[in-house]
Image (spheres, grey):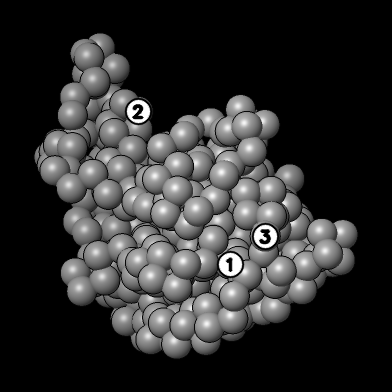
Amino acid sequence: MCYGCHPILWDDRHAAARVHLFALQRGGRLALQGRRTAAAASAPHRCGDGVPRDQSDTQLQITAFRQQLQKLGWIEGDGFRIDIRYGADDPRHIRALAKELLGLGPDLMVSNSNLVTAILQSEIHRVPQVFISVSDPIGSGFVTDLARPTGNVTGFANFQPSMGSKWLELLRQIAPQIEHVGLLYFPEPPNIGYLKSAEAAAPLFHEKLVGLEVRSGAEIESVVAAFGSEPHGGLIIAPNVVTFANSDLIALTARHRIPAIYPFAFYAKAGGLVSYGFDAAEQFRQGAGYVDRLLKGAKPADLPVQHPSKFELVINLGTAKALSLDIPPQLLSLADEVI
C-alpha cells in the first residue's frame, strides 16, 4: 500500500502561520499489511525528517502527527511519503494548493483551521476529510451532528463558543485595572460566537467589550494601535487563521502595553502575558489516529467529532512584570505552567 502524505502549510514569508492541509494517497492493501506487521514487531522509528531543528509550535504539531502515524505503522520511505507545502492566510493561495493536492488523487485529506477546512470541503466531493483544531464545526457548516458526522468529514474541534467569556474572566483576574476589552477576531461564525459570549459576560465584570474585526494580517497593526491609544485596555486574541499567520501580535501588545490573553500556550511561551487553551500537538496525534482508522476502512460517520477534555493555563511572569502587573497568588496556583 503506497501512500503519499502532502501537508500544506505556511509560506516562508509568514513563519508564524499555523494552517495545515494534508493529502494521503494509497495503493494496494496487502503491501501495507506486510509493512505494518514488521513495524509492529520492532521499536518505533523516528520520522524520516527527524525532529525539526526549529521547534516552533507548528513544527511540533507536524512532528507529533508524523510520529504518531509512524507508531501506527506508517513508515516514511517505505511506501509512505510526506511532502509539505506552505500557505498563510490567503484564501486564493490555499485553494490553489488544495487543488494541487486533490489533483494527486488522494484517498484522504486532513485540514487544520476553519479557513482551510471550509476551502477544502468546497473542493472535495468523495474523498474523506479529517479536520484538526477547528472552531464550532456545526455552526461553521462542517458537520450537522457531532456524534455521527454526516458526509465524508469528521475530526477534532478546539473551543466552544462559551470560551469567549472564560477568556474575559481570566484577563480580568490577571489585569484587574482594565476598563475596556477588545476581542480581536476574524468575521467567521466561531469567532462571532466568542465575541457574543464575551459581550454577554462583560457586564458581570463591569467591563466594556468591543469587537475588533480584522480580515487580513495587514490590518492588525493599525487596529491594535488604535485600540492601544486609550489607557486601561485589554485584548482577547481569538483563534483564527489571521492571528495565527502573524507573529507581530506579541510585540504589538508589548509596544502598546496592552495586557492580552491568547488561545494557545505557544503565545505565552513566546512572550505573551497569558494563554488558556489545549494541547494542539496532542490533537494532531489524535488526528493521526483517525487517519489510521479511516485508511483501514472506517467511515467518517463512525468517528465522532471530539472536543478537548483538558485546558491549560500558562502565565508569563516576565511579561506581567514588564506591564507592572501583580499576578494574584490564587491564579498562579491554578496555572499549569508559569514562565
Q: Distance between the residues labelled 2 and 3?
A: 50 Å
Which residue is labeled 3 in the image? 177
Rendered residue at 45%/73% (across/down)? 256
Residue 19 seen in the current view: no
Which residue is labeled 2 in the image? 72
Q: Which mark is residue 104?
A: none
Q: Amino acid type of disc 2? A: Leu
Q: Based on the displayed image, in which of its 4 quarters is residue 109 positioned?
A: bottom left
Q: Is label 2 in a helix, a strand or a loop?
A: loop
Q: In this view, does 62 lie above or below 128?
A: above
Residue 232 seen in the current view: yes
Q: Is label 3 in a helix, a strand or a loop?
A: loop
Q: Based on the displayed image, in which of its 4 quarters is residue 38 positioned?
A: top left
Q: Amino acid type of disc 1? A: Leu
Rendered residue at 14%/37% (across/down)? 50
Rendered residue at 47%/83% (across/down)? 225
Instruction: Tell which residue pokes out farthest to the front in this image.
Output: 324
